[in-house]
Amino acid sequence: MGPIVITGAAGYLGGLLATHYAAARDPAQVRCVVRHTVQAGPLASMGCDVLVGDLADPSVCDSAVDGAELVIHAAARLGTGPRSEFFDINVGATERLARACAAGGARFVFVSSIEAYGVFAGRVLTEDQPHLPNRHAYSESKYAGEQAVSRAYRRYGGDRYTIVRPGMIYGPRSPYWTHRYLQRARAGSIGVLGGGGRIFPVHEADVVNAIATAAVSVRSPGQIYNLVNDEGLSWWDWAHAHHQLVQSGAPHQESVVALRLRSLSRVASGRAGYRRRFEVELRTAVIPHRKAHDHLGWRPRRFKAGVLDCATTNTSLSVTVPGREPR
């Protein structure tokens, strides 16, 4: 039985996956791919086999996949930056890894994102819905990465790959979706745009569980799965929960009209506007996880229960998910 390979193992989700597999089997059989030597220490201390290298280098991809039983590709280009960098990593490196896996017979799990749908536009986003371009580099590169995976396996006549599309991954170790919002709540008040559009959270432990299950399921080859909580939550629910966790303050409503005017002013002066914030925070789409439930037996925890894991001051705090109206 070959090693399990995890790319992006120095990152948030990759680190969670490395910890999971190191505990579940011989950690020496968990090959963690990181970009810099300084990132290797914590993984090596768990007993993992650490490969240092840049996935932009084809030889690193070949070394990572060599003899592997399973490759979980969690590395990704995030944040802001030149569009070419997103495509170099989220598409180019993904395709190189997928080709190496398909050629060597390894199973491949690609961690994509719900952002691969592109424009949400109030749609019911089951896994068979098409990508609608939105001119956002991360979104479009994630979709192109998915296409690259299926293309690589078709080339070798196989389908031993699975694509997962997590939503907003929150939990006690989440730097972006948890710690950042707890900090905002402590600092005063989390702003919610307008009436508060839909959010699509998923607890970190549920994502790890879904990936580990998909990696061995007989039903998952060639499949795509949404990994989201589908309770129909809003940004008001999200903001209220974080304020309750720190037992301080309350969310406030931000005017959509006022922000649009500020955005237009910024664009007119040559600066970036707030287009992306409007897209993300005013969504009305529905993203069901029925397919993951039916194929994998996946049952993500309710947000009311999951958010309690994020409490830093009182883990017995009773969190009430409020209604949808601004407070």
Image: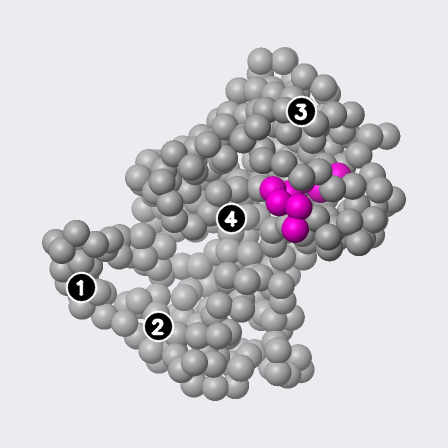
Q: Counting residues from the N terminus, which is met first, the one under dot 4 or under dot 3?
A: 3
Foreground: disc 4 or disc 1 = 1
Amino acid carrying mark 3 in the image: Asp
Residues under numbered marks 4 and 3 in contact, where contact means CB atoms less than 8 Å apart: no
Give the residue at mark 2. Answer: 191
Residue type marked 2: Gly
Q: Earlier in the sequence, mark 3 or mark 1?
A: 3
For this view, does 281 lie left or right of residue 271? Answer: right
Mark 4 vs mark 1, CA separation in Å:
34 Å
Camera-near label (3 vs 1) is 3
For image coordinates 38% across by 48% down, the residue present is 80
Residue 38 in the magenta stretch? The answer is: yes
Q: Which is more N-terminal, label 2 or label 4?
A: 2
Q: Could you tell me if residue 205 is visible in this image?
A: yes
Amino acid under disc 4: Pro
Which of the two discs, 3 and 2, labels the residue nearer the N terminus?
Answer: 3
Q: Which residues are magenta?
A: 30-39
Drawn side of residue 205 relative to residue 272, left or right: right
Q: Please, is residue 247 above or below residue 288 in the view? A: below
Residue depicted at x 63% and y 13%: 157
Query: In this rendering, which labeled residue sits more in front, label 4 or label 2?
Result: 2
The kind of secondary structure element at disc 4 is loop
Does residue 231 appear in the picture of this structure? no
Counting residues from the start of the chain, the first of labels 4 and 1 encountered is 1
Q: Which residue is mark 1?
A: 262
Where residue 86 appears, as percent x and y from the top left, is 43, 38
In this rendering, the answer to whether 246 lies above or below 56 is: below
Q: Which mark is residue 288?
A: 4
Q: Secondary structure at mark 1?
A: helix
Label annotation for residue 62: 3
Looking at the rendering, in which quadrant would you find the N terminus?
top right
